[in-house]
Each structure stands twice: as structure tokens, then as C-alpha cells.
Amino acid sequence: MNFTRWSARLPGTQRRAAARTEQTASPDRRGEGSVPAARAERLTDGDRPPPAVDELEVREVLDRVPCLVALVHGPDHRIAYLNDAYTAAFGLRPVGAPARGALPELDELGLLPLLDQVLRSGKPRTVKSRKAPDGRSYTFTCTPAGEGDGRGVLVFATDVTDHAEAAERLRASERRQRETAVTLQRSLLPQELEEPDDLRVAATYHPGGTEAAVGGDWYDVITLGGGRTALVIGDVMGRGVRAAAVMGQLRTAVRAYARLDLPPHEVLQLLDGLAMEIDANQIATCVYAIHDPNEGRLVYASAGHLPILVRDENGTVRRADEPTGPPLGTGGWMHTSGTVPLGPGSTAVLYTDGLVERRDEDLDEGIASLERALAGATGGPQVVCDRLVRSAGVTPEHDDDVAVLVLQHPARSGPESELFRNAALELLGGVEAAPRARAFASGVLTSWRFPAELHDLGVLATSELVANSLQHGTPPMRLRLRRTDRRLIIEVTDGDDHLPRRRRAEPGDESGRGIAIVATIASAWGSRRTPGGGKAVWCEFLLPKTAGVGV
């Protein structure tokens, strides 16, 4: 093989040829005094200059470089030259043989189409970190060489095994970190959603991206007692284990505050202060809502979160209106509550920004797309949840976390509607209201065909709650009885906002035993302040299975 012919096309050779031309003309310039005297004196002393790069044999250079070098020519890439490093890695190959059969390692690496491309275009191409059959990883640079019928390609491979292994170790470490973060995230989310009597709920969570930077999206469903349900969804800004840990603290705090049965805006006010204590640099968005089946609406408050979407029984979708305050952790803001109708047959969706936010479109467009998807999504809450996620194009490679919470207030009819019934009585007058309330409760529970024991316990609880309200409360007063397919709920409201508490009555005390009696006989009891002043005191009894059907 004539390497002089190929050397002119090796990278950098044109520059060396230009330098050689200048050196050829240098004797004439020396005669003109262009060489310094010191240089001339050294030359006259007999010292010989070091050999120039162009005086080195090309084959000698290529044979000694540690990188793999192969030279192929022609459309079928016949082997012209392999250096010692190449043959040491893959063995000897016959000169003149086509690369497809003689260089199977290049074929396995998918480089033969690249050689064709370089030969056609005359432009160099590089592929990074390909693992060869010898187990080592190489970066291949293919450079065109030669002209006319002698055109070929110089293949130059650099061993990057150490770098590739280090990169793989880093990727494995990131995968482990992500798995840890996702595991932490999922462990902090509810493993099973609570199932309210009057609502059907479903939720889903999708961690975003493939790196360790999962976010702090979360949701929860909390039964408050008395038939009421709290629903919450939030998003901690930032990513990684820290965001997941902050999310876990906020979710735990929400459950604790929810047990106080406070209005939504007061819950957010408490969360705002807690978020500042956890980490002043970590903020979060959140929406907290309460559903009361007696009112047929959601009462909610939002801290910088996206609007709730509600589809009514006719299929019309609307966004929950303001108020929306700043995110949690900013401080200095008084949150307020708003309402949105949620009657029988309605579906509401709470979600995080990963479902609707895209880099290439406005956020309002994403919310509008979700509204259209909700308008056409029928079926149970889990079906609706899955359809919304699919319509938003959420995949395992999605770059942001997604949390979705769907709740439905079913429209019941036929025998099922008999399992959900209400009865109410305005408590007018003085002490005579107590016997009237007992008679009303007895008649209602008899019509609902409850067992005798449950009937008597319900009348006793009604008597104690009404007596407590008559003694300590102020008008207006109201008694409400409600049954679901699982429980009997008795609730008394009045105009005084002083909440009763259970206490131990001394033997000589004439009062103080009513709430203690209710707490003893009922499955659960509680109290809360009502909007506009006043309070509600309630208790509930779990229904025996034999009482599951009422008429």
C-alpha cells in the first residue's frame, strides 16, 4: 500500500504541506538575513534541527498510536490498512477484503451505513461510546480520505471504556436515587383512599421524568364525620427527596387540622405558617375543599393552586371561581373560602400543574383542553381519572409529576335512593322542643325501619343533643336526621358558637353528662362552627348489615 498517497488526506496534512512549502523557500530568505544570527551560528556549529512532522513515516506514526485506526476504500469499503492497536483488539484481517465480511465488529456496531454516508457526503462523522464485541467502549470518528476511484474512509476509534463505565455507574446511582425518591413519595401518599358515604373518589399519581428529581405532588381524602368529606391536593415546589419530605409533613398536618373541622381558609392559614417553619425557601400550592351532602356544594380555599373543574349532570364544565391566594410559605395573606355547586350527578376534578402545563403552550390552553376532556369523560371516577391522564398525553417519560383526584356525587334512584334519606325539624319554642324532637326522631327512625336497639339509641342521642342545645345554645335551632347505606347521622345546629366538650361530671353535678352519654353510645361524635356564626353538634351510628335496606 502506498501510504504517501493516503497521507496527503490525513487530518491536518494540508497545513503541513503549506508549512513544507514555506520551508522550501527558506534558504533564499536566509541569504537576505531573515534568520537571526544566533540561529545561523548554531547551524554553522554542525547542530542538526529535530526532524519535522512531515519527515516521519505515516505508517510508523499510525502503528504506534494507542487508538484503533482502520483505512478502507471503495464503495464496499475494502481494507487498506489496520494499525497494531486495531489488530490487537480484534485480530488480523486480510488486506483488500470488504469490510462487511472482514470487519464484523464494525457491522455489529452499525458503522457500515455511516461509512457509506461519509463516502457519499465527503464529511466526517462521529458516534460516541459504542460498546464493541471485545467488551470495550469506543468513540468512532470516520473521516473521508483520498480522491476519485481511490476514495476511502479513515476510521479512528478512541477507547472510552473508563468514561463509559463511570457514566453507567452515575446513571445507576441516579436510578437508585430516583427509586428511593419515588418510594418515599408513594409511601407518603395514601395507600388507600377513604371512601365517603356520599361520594365516589379515585386518584392517581405519576412521577415525572427518568432522573431522581421526582416532585412533591400529593392528594388526600379525609372523612370528617357527620357525612362531610375533606379533599385536598397540593404541589410542593422543587424536586427530589427534599420536596417529597416537605410534602409528607404538609399532608400529615392537613390531616391533623382537618380533624378540627375548620373552614377551608382557616386550614390553609395554619398550613401557611407551618410551611414557613418547615422551610422558608420551600413553597407549595394547595387547594382544600369540603363537601357537605346536605348543602350540595364544595366549599374550598386555594393557595396558588389551579382551579377545580366541575362537570354537572348535564355535562357542562365550569371552573371554580376565585378566591385564590398566594402559595403556602409566603406568609402575610388572609385566605378566604369560595363555593362551587356539586349536586347529584356532578363530577369534580382536582389536579396538579403537571397534567395541564406544557412548555410550548399557555397554561390556560392546557386547562381548556382538560375541560374538553372532562366534558367527554363518562363512567366511574377511576375511568374518568385514567381518561384525563391519557388525554393529556402523560407517559412514563413525562417531565413533571402528575396527581389527579376525581370525585363524583352519584345521582341515586330506585331502591338505592331509599338508602340515602334526610329529615329535618326546626326547634321552636322552649323546653317543649325536647319532647317534640324525641317524637319526631322516633317517627322518622320507625319509618326507616331500623332495628329496635338502634331506634332507641337514636332517640336517646337526639334527646341529649337537643337538650344540650336548648340549655347552652341560642336560636335558630334545627334537628337533622340523615341515613346513608352505612350509618345514621344525627345533627343539631344552633346560633351559639361555643363548642361543647366532653367532661367528667361530679356526682353532685346536675349537668355535664349529655355529651358524655352521646360519646359513649355513638360510633363517633363531633362539633364545628358554622358559617355566619353558630355551631353544629353531631353523632353517628354504624348501621348493622341487616339494616342496609330501608323503605
Image (tube, helix red, strand yellow):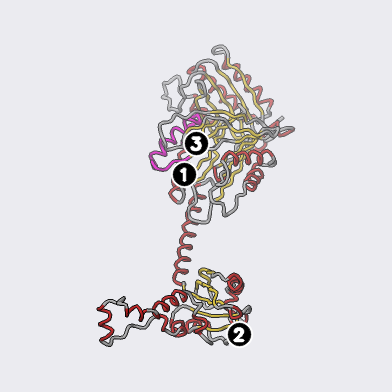
Please name whichever residue, 175 or 137, is drawn nearer the observer in this view of the structure.
137
In the rendered image, the vertical position of residue 240 relative to residue 91, given as above or below: above
Q: Quadrant of residue 421?
A: top right
Lateral position of residue 424 relative to residue 467, left or right: right
Lateral position of residue 213 relative to residue 379, left or right: left
- Report the residue marked by disc 3: 304
Image quarter of the N terminus? bottom right
Instruction: Point out the tag, 2 or 1, that comes first from the N-terminus.
Output: 2
Query: Which-is-in-front pick, marks 3 and 2?
Result: 2
Q: Residue 237 — which label?
A: 1
Identify which amino acid the numbered label 1 is placed on. Answer: Met
Instruction: Point out the tag, 3 or 1, that comes first from the N-terminus.
Output: 1
Residue 445 in the image: state x and y as whole percent.
Answer: 65, 26
Residue 369 is covered by the magenta coloring: no
* Bounds of the magenta segment: 255-284
Tell me what residue is drawn at x 56 percent, y 48 percent: 205
Say what secondary structure mark 1 lies in: loop
- Report the residue marked by disc 2: 97
Instruction: Give the residue furthest to the top.
Output: 429
Please name whichever residue, 72 or 281, is drawn nearer the observer in this view of the structure.
72
